[in-house]
Image: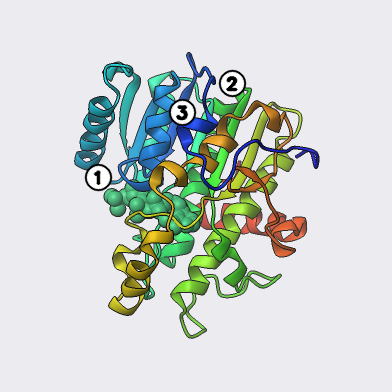
Amino acid sequence: MSERATSRFGRRSTAEQVSEGVDLSGRHAVVTGANTGIGYETARVLALRGASVTLACRDIAKAEAARQRILRESDGRIDVAALHLLRLDLGHLASVRTAASELLASGRPLHLLINNAGVMLPDRRETSDGFEAHVGINHLGHFLLTSLLLPRLRESAPARVVAVSSEALHFATLTPELHDLDWTERRFSGWRSYGDSKLMNVLFARELSRRLEGEGIVAHALHPGIVRTELARDQRWPMRIVGLLMLPALKSPQRGAATTVYAATASELGTSGGGYFSDCAPAKAGTRADDLELAARLWARSEELTGSGV
Ligand SMILES: NC(=O)c1ccc[n+]([C@@H]2O[C@H](COP(=O)([O-])OP(=O)(O)OC[C@H]3O[C@@H](n4cnc5c(N)ncnc54)[C@H](OP(=O)(O)O)[C@@H]3O)[C@@H](O)[C@H]2O)c1
């Protein structure tokens, strides 16, 4: 991404403000985890700007409730036909494959893929495929989804892929050899494991951009800020109390979705990818996130683990 890229927006900007004047008519966006939090607001604002949006959620009843809420909040500015529902459980690779097949079979183009869904867990859990849950859901599920949708992204170019990461990437423990991604040989730390998955989100966006250079598809990653959402729902009481004390300082979901919508739609970002943003402006993700060899190794390992081979 251009080093000179600057932004008129900041911490207090909302997703509606950063997309003021943006016309997404004729564009189709897929937002994972669109039923609540940052994903909901991202989907709502992309639809408000004219995109047709697929709400890709693990619970289809929650997805339908989100669709109804978007329609209620839009005062007639969004048509029900612009909002599609897709069942997607990122913790179950068979579900990811089914969801990708359904999307491809729908014939819809794909201009914006927003890899937003995520979990933040206090204890070690496994996905139904046996991966540690942060790595499995936050990274591998999105890796496979994106890989399977690449042909449609290519046909639809120009297109953008946006990975919702986190500053928690600074707590990551990833080694150059990607040792023990499943946390079976070390004492588990929820925070560090979450950090690993969020570093993977940035490395994935960087490697994806590198691989697709010149094809009209760019990928960016971002930190949304600390946002008032349901993300801490699985945390234990001490952590939840810290969260409650921090409440007044947290961003609203409207502000929390701003950096995602900025990375997905801002024309000033040009045609080169691999950017990392915070508060709607370019930011530094740290040396490990800049490690292109690590990004390439993670890509190869993710292909092995998901059996994707793009
Ligand atoms: N909130 C923050 O302060 C903050 C800070 C930095 C980064 N982030 C990142 O922002 C993203 C959005 O989080 P949020 O804060 O909006 O949290 P949230 O309110 O808890 O929303 C998370 C979304 O992910 C979905 N999800 C969880 N597991 C899934 C699975 N296996 N398959 C498909 N969808 C799944 C959830 O669906 P259900 O409702 O059905 O569970 C929900 O829609 C995450 O990637 C998170 O890491 C958030």
| As drawn, 115 above or below 179 | above
Question: What label sits on residue 59 in the rendered view?
Answer: 1
Q: Where in the figure is residue 76, as x and y percent of width and height?
A: 27, 16
Left or right of 108: which side holds 82? left
Residue 300: mark: none
Where is mark 2, residue-wise? Answer: 155
- Ligand 1 neighbours mark 1 (CB distance < 8 Å): yes
The residue closer to the viewer here, 188 or 82, is 82
Q: Earlier in the sequence, mark 1 or mark 3?
A: 3
Q: Secondary structure at mark 1?
A: loop
Q: Amino acid at mark 3?
A: Ala
Amino acid on which the number 2 mark rests in the picture: Glu
Q: Nearer the viewer, mark 2 or mark 1?
A: 1
Separation of residues labelled 2 and 3 (CA atoms): 14 Å
Residue at the spot x=46%, y=28% of the render?
29
Q: How far apart are the alpha carbons under marks 1 and 3? A: 19 Å
Mark 3 = which residue?
29
Residue 297 image point, x, y percent: 69, 59
- Relative to residue 252, is residue 24 depicted above or below? above
> How far from the left and from the top, in percent, is residue 250?
42, 57
